[in-house]
Image: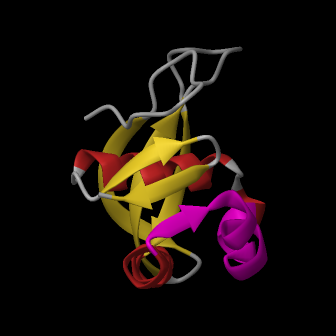
Amino acid sequence: MVIPKPDAKSDFIIKGWGKRRGEGALIYYIPNHQNPNKPYQKGITVSEWELAFNELMETGSFSREWFNEHMKPCMREGTCNFTTIGGVFELLDIARYERGVYRRV
C-alpha cells in the first residue's frame, strides 16, 4: 500500500511489521534513487505510533515541530517518518494534511 506524502516524487510503500530499536514496528520502503530495485527500509515503533496518535487525539493535530521535539529517535532515523505517520493517519481517515500539520478529522 502506498503511503500518501504531500511532496513525494516517488512512492513510499508499507512492507509490514518488523523490529526497530528493539521494538515492534511498521516497516516501509523508501525510494533509492541510485538503485531503484533496492529501496531503503525505515520503521516506526509501536510506542512512537502511540505517542503520535495520542497527540493527534488530545490536541487535534500532529505537527512537525511537535514530532521533532517529542519523537527524537524517530526523527533521527529519518525526517520522512513524520509524513509517514501522518500519511498512515490519512489512510485511516483520522487526519488531513495542512501545511506541515496533520489535523484530526
Answer with the quarter of the image where residue 11 lies.
top left
**Image quadrant in which the N terminus is located:** top left
In this view, the residue in front, 90 or 99, is 99
Q: On the picture, is 68 further left or further right than 45? A: right
Residue 4 in sight in this render: yes
Residue 44, given in percent of the width and then of the height, sits at: 49, 65
The quadrant where residue 24 appears: bottom left
The quadrant the C terminus occupies is bottom left
Between 42 and 8, the one lying in front of the other is 8
Q: Residue at x 63, y 23 (%)?
A: 32
Q: Which residue occupies 77% across, 63% down?
A: 76
| Horizontal and vertical percent position of residue 93 | 22, 51
Dividing the picture into quarters, in which one does residue 4 lie?
Answer: top left
- Colour scheme of this structure image? secondary structure
66 w.r.t. 12: above or below: below
Does any portion of residue 85 appear in the rendered image?
no
- The magenta segment: 60-75
- Decide whether the magenta segment is chiefly helix, strand or loop: helix
Would you say residue 68 sits in the magenta stretch? yes
> In the image, is 86 to the left or to the right of 64?
left
Q: Is residue 49 above or below residue 2?
A: below
Which residue sits at x=71%, y=51%? 79
- The question of residue 103 being in magenta is answered with no
Which percent across, then down, holds residue 98? 53, 43
- Is residue 58 shown above or below 25? below
Q: How many marks?
A: 0
Is residue 48 or residue 16 the one in the foreground?
Answer: 48
- Residue at the (64%, 47%) spot, across then down: 100
Query: x and y percent of residue 34 in the render?
Result: 71, 14
